[in-house]
Amino acid sequence: MDTEAIPVAEAELAEKVRPLVNDILARFNEANITPQEAGVVVVALLHRLLQVLHDTPEAQRQVALSVLSLINEHLQGAFMEAPETPPCSCC
């Protein structure tokens, strides 16, 4: 397996979806969507995506692993921050 191709593919995907993500965030700002409301939208979209991928368990597993990896990285970073850092304001 070519391990150098994985980061390239991820970078290409990030570049491809970046405009869509920016449009969604701009729309959230226009509608005065709070961080909590944005979180509900993200969870709802994730739920719907997993439903759509019901018949493709490998793709469903990859999405779930990606989300769990992101959450794990976030939590690791949060635990490594200085103790005087205030908690996230959206929680």
Image: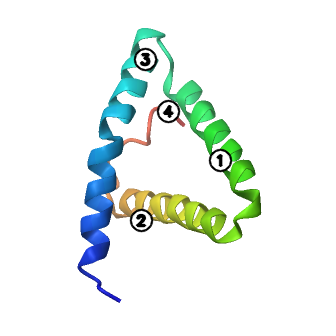
How far across and down, in percent of the image, does residue 78 sit? 40, 56
Q: Nearer the N terminus, badge 2 or badge 3?
A: 3
Number of residues whose C-alpha sits closer than 10 Å to that of mark 3, classed few (under 14), some (14–19) or many (20 or more): few
Query: Three-letter amino acid code at disc 2?
Result: Gln
Q: Which residue is drawn at 26% across and 58% down?
A: 11
The residue tagged 4 is 90
Q: In this view, does 80 lie to the left or right of 39?
A: left
Residue assigned mark 1? 49
Instruction: Please provide percent x and percent y for residue 69.
Output: 48, 65
Type of amino acid at the residue the image marks with label 1: Leu
State how far apart marks 1 and 3 are (Cα): 21 Å
Q: Can residue 82 be seen in this view?
A: no
Quick one: quadrant of the N terminus? bottom left
Alpha carbon of mark 4 to alpha carbon of mark 1: how far?
Answer: 24 Å
Residue at (65%, 63%) from the top-left corner?
Answer: 60
**Element carrying mark 2:** helix
Please tell me which of labels 2 and 1 falls first in the chain: 1
Q: In this view, does 11 lie to the left or right of 59?
A: left
Q: Residue 76 carries which label?
A: 2
Q: Position of residue 63 (x, y in %)?
A: 57, 60
Question: In the image, 49: left or right of 69?
Answer: right
